[in-house]
Each structure stands twice: as structure tokens, then as C-alpha cells.
Image (cartoon, rainbow, N blue to C red):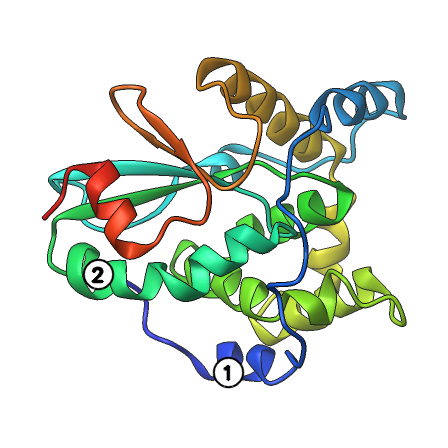
């Protein structure tokens, strides 16, 4: 069952004042490999404890749903935001809450800002993950593209509204072990599923489809009715 909207989600959304539709399509463009190399060249990783909880699956929908779809997304991709706002709510109502569909979220950050946001989202309890990334997508212009403000501070404020303390926020975004693990997994999956743009959706049989799919296009791709 999809998580219900919470007060902190509404607080984040009140910060969004700009349109997300004016920017061009987001592409990976060899982003991950340079970041992996840079991370490896830095000082020894900050102790982050067991990374398994950070890297464990994040999904919505029943485990025994008829269809499982992986969504490869970047939190700074405007087309990912369009899918989150325009298509996902209808999917939740008609396919996910009814037990037909399960969506597994796969991080595919296109830049450093998206990577930091993805790390922060994974630091939250699992039940807050999907509401938080949905709120980030809905307020994307406020935190990711605000040229007059500090992106890190904006992200920290939103994380605080979701219940993540500033101390934990700072620890997470400086966790080099987590950063490397997420980027290396992204690189592996980009090869396995031939991912070069976001959003990209993948079925368990390897079939993929890219773009901010409409509800009807998504249902057709997934073989749902």
C-alpha cells in the first residue's frame, strides 16, 4: 500500500513555485564513471557503518504483485519529476494499491546534486522514502535549480522536515563509502540494462522503455490492463 501524505510532505511542497516543464531531457552522459574515479581518489571513506540498510530495496506495491517494474531515475531530472507528478499518482490508485503493480526505485543520479539527494532519501525510514522523493520532485525548482540559494542547505531543510537531523544529514552526504557503492551499482546497472537516460523503466525480462510515460503508455509497456 502506498504511503499516505504527511504533514512534512505538505511543508516541502509549499516551497515549490516554478514550472518543471521548461527544461530539456536529462541524460546520463558518462556522469557516473568520473564520479566513481574521483571518489576512489579521495581520502579513506567516512565510517558509515553497515551500508546494507542504505542500499536495500526501496519500492511501493505488494511483493506478490502481478508485475514488477524498475524505475531508473535522477532526482534532478525534470522528466522524472513529470512522471512522478503526472503518472505515478494514477498508477498508485489504479495499479499499485490494487495489487497489480510493484515499482522498485533504482537510483541513477545524473549529477552530484542528484547523488546527494539520493543518499539523503535512503537515510530516511523506508516508509518515508517514496513520499520524500515525490516531494523532492514536486519542489525540484526550489532546491535543485535555485541559483540564488545554497542547494545543500535547501536539501538539508527538506530532510529536516522529513525527520532527518542535521547531524545525520551531514554524516550521510559525506559518507564516501555509500557514495562509491551507489555509483558502482549505477554503473553496473547501466551496462546490464543499457540505461543511458532517465527515466528508464525495466521489466524483469529485460525489456526497457525510456521517457516520462503517460499512464496509458506505462500500462501498455508493463502489460497491465
Residue receiving disc 2: 1
**Is residue 177 toward the left or the right of residue 189 in the image?**
right
Q: CA separation, marks 1 and 2?
A: 20 Å
How far across and down, in percent of the image, does residue 28 sit? 65, 32
Q: Is residue 37 above or below residue 166?
A: above
The part of the image, by quadrant, that contains residue 166 is bottom right
Q: Residue at x 62, y 45 (%)?
A: 25
Q: Residue at x 75, y 49 (%)?
A: 113
How far across and down, in percent of the image, does residue 161 sit? 60, 76
The part of the image, by quadrant, that contains residue 51 is top right
Q: Is residue 202 above or below residue 13?
A: above
How far across and down, in percent of the image, does residue 192 sit? 46, 14
Decide: few, some or many residues near mark 1? Use Cα within 10 Å; few <14, some 14-19, many ≥20. few
Q: Residue at x 76, y 33 (%)?
A: 176
Kindly state the secondary structure of the residue where label 1 is placed.
Answer: helix
> Closer to the N terminus: mark 1 or mark 2?
2
Residue receiving disc 1: 10
**Is residue 161 toward the left or the right of residue 61 in the image?**
right
- Residue 209 visible? The answer is yes
Q: Which mark is residue 194?
A: none
Q: Quadrant of the N terminus?
A: bottom left
Amino acid at each position: 500500500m502506498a504511503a499516505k501524505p504527511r504533514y512534512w510532505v505538505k511543508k516541502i511542497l509549499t516551497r515549490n513555485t516554478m514550472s518543471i516543464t521548461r527544461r530539456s531531457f536529462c541524460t546520463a552522459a558518462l556522469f557516473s564513471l568520473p564520479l566513481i574515479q574521483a571518489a576512489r581518489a579521495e581520502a579513506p571513506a567516512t565510517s558509515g557503518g553497515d551500508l546494507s540498510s542504505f542500499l536495500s530495496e526501496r519500492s511501493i506495491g505488494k511483493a506478490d504483485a502481478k508485475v514488477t517494474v524498475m524505475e531508473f531515475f535522477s532526482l534532478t531530472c525534470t522528466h522524472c519529476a513529470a512522471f512522478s507528478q503526472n503518472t505515478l499518482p494514477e498508477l498508485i490508485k489504479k495499479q499499485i494499491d490494487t495489487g497489480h503493480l510493484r515499482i522498485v526505485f533504482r537510483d541513477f543520479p545524473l549529477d552530484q546534486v542528484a547523488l546527494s539527494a539520493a543518499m539523503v532519501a535512503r537515510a530516511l525510514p523506508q516508509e518515508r522514502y517514496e513520499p520524500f522523493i515525490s516531494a523532492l520532485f514536486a519542489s525540484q525548482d526550489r532546491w535543485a535549480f535555485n541559483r540564488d540559494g545554497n542547494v545543500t542547505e535547501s536539501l538539508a531543510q527538506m530532510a529536516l522536515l522529513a525527520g532527518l537531523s542535521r547531524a545525520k544529514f551531514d554524516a550521510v552526504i559525506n559518507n564516501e563509502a555509500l557514495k562509491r557503492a551507489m555509483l558502482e551499482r549505477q554503473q553496473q546497472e547501466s551496462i546490464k540494462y543499457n540505461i543511458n537516460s532517465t527515466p528508464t523503466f525495466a521489466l524483469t525480462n529485460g525489456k526497457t522503455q525510456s521517457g516520462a510515460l503517460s499512464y496509458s503508455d506505462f500500462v501498455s509497456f508493463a502489460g497491465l490492463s
